[in-house]
Amino acid sequence: MRKIAIVTRELVLGGIEKALITMLKAIPKEDYDITVFVMGAGGELKEDLPENVKLECLYGYEKSIFEKVSKSIKKLKIIHAFEVGWYSILAKKTKTVFDQEMYLSKIAPIVNEKFDLAIAYHVPASFPVIYVINSLNAEHKVAWIHSDVSNYIDPLQRYIKYYEQYDKIFCVSHQAMEEFNKFLPNLKGRTELFYNMLDKERLKLLSETGEQYDDGFNGFKILTIGRLTSEKGQELIPGILKKLLSKGLNVRWYCIGDGVNRGVLEQRIKELHLKNNLILLGSKNNPYRYLRDCDLYVQPSQHEGYCITLAEARLFNRPIITTDFAGAREQIIHGTTGLIVEYGEDFIYKQILCLLNNNVLMQTFEKNLSNIDVENKSDISQLLKII
């Protein structure tokens, strides 16, 4: 069997992680021995890993640095105990993400097992990019670009020497690939497009089960899915919703996801008296009944790579409004399968208002989306042909 190693951060609820799970399920289990290495144990998607895939936590399962050091001392690994303590302290004190990732990579073990293929599967400037090069023994090495690198130019400068050692760089959208090629034109011959994969049958099945809207609201339901972070743009939602309500519209906006900006959103909800109209549902392992039954899906992100939740909204034929991030125009045909707008409160507000007053256009979007295949199942051969 061919052996594949994949390094990512955690198996938390996120677009990158969901795309990874779908890709793993598409790899023939009878032909490939797969190990996924993660930085942190646990995560909501851990249970979604295919049974044939092995999971290894690079930092172990101890809950603190003290526990890690103590465990090494008990095993008489004194030098390793010192390294864990020292590099952990340095990682916490450093001012740059790169230096933090470098120190953390020194704590993670070097894997002696030989692989046919090793994959760094996360954002462009992150631990997996370093670890695959420094600590994994593989015949071929691949990096995955899940984001628009133009948003990482400064931190990426120190990753250049690592990318130059990869045999292939897969980018999840044409625009992401174009930006990467601008950043490292000497690697253009190694870059290739690989859209995030979706399992249509599985998602349709999941939409028949799990949680659903249960608040008895009979008005217009808007949905946004994503981590509650600045890059995902949910901070615009309270202002947009307040304007819609001031027009006398019967609208309720639901947000699925959690993150560091939850407190900020809760404060804005309080300030603008939106308690009954802006509903923070938190993280959901299965958000697909919500997605299937919403009236409008809005993706207000500042930047993305491909955006898996946008693809999922397309799969369920939902009318869509999205900001103009990398990959948006590869998923949505403006005016035909949805609306693409500039990032900003007024831009999104005006387009939502437009759709609320144009039911024919919404029905047109739904019909046109129903004729598009968004699974990308054939892409798996691009990866496997490397080995």
Image (tube, rainbow, N blue to C red):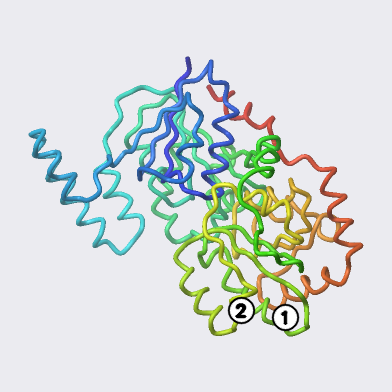
Residue under the point 84% across and 53% down = 366
Q: Looking at the picture, tell me which residue is in the foreground, 132 or 57.
A: 57
- Is label 1 in a helix, a strand or a loop? helix
Above or below, comparing residue 22 to residue 177 in the picture: above
Q: Would you say residue 323 is visible in this rendering?
A: no
Of labels 2 and 1, earlier in sequence is 1
Find out whether the residues at labels 2 and 1 contact each other: C-beta distance under 8 Å. Answer: yes
The residue indicated by pointer 1 is: 245
Image quadrant in which you'd find residue 360? bottom right
Give amino acid for label 2. Leu
Above or below, comparing residue 95 to residue 289 in the picture: below
Q: Would you say residue 342 is visible in this rendering?
A: yes
Above or below, comparing residue 290 to residue 383 in the picture: below
Image quadrant in which you'd find residue 72? top left
Above or below, comparing residue 87 to residue 379 in the picture: below
Q: Position of residue 199 (x, y in %)?
A: 66, 36
Q: Position of residue 291 (x, y in %)?
A: 69, 53
Q: Position of residue 38 (x, y in %)?
A: 38, 40
Residue farthest along the right direction in this orientation: 360
Q: Position of residue 5 (x, y in %)?
A: 43, 30
Q: CA distance from mark 2 to mark 1?
A: 9 Å
- Is label 2 in a helix, a strand or a loop? loop
Question: Which label is found at residue 22?
Answer: none
Residue under the point 58% across and 76% down = 275
Question: Which label is found at residue 274?
Answer: 2
Could you tell me how many numbered marks the image carries?
Answer: 2
Give amino acid for label 1. Leu
Classify mark 2: residues with Cα within 10 Å, few (<14), some (14-19) or many (20+).
some
Residue under the point 42% across and 33% down = 36
Residue under the point 22% across and 51% down = 64
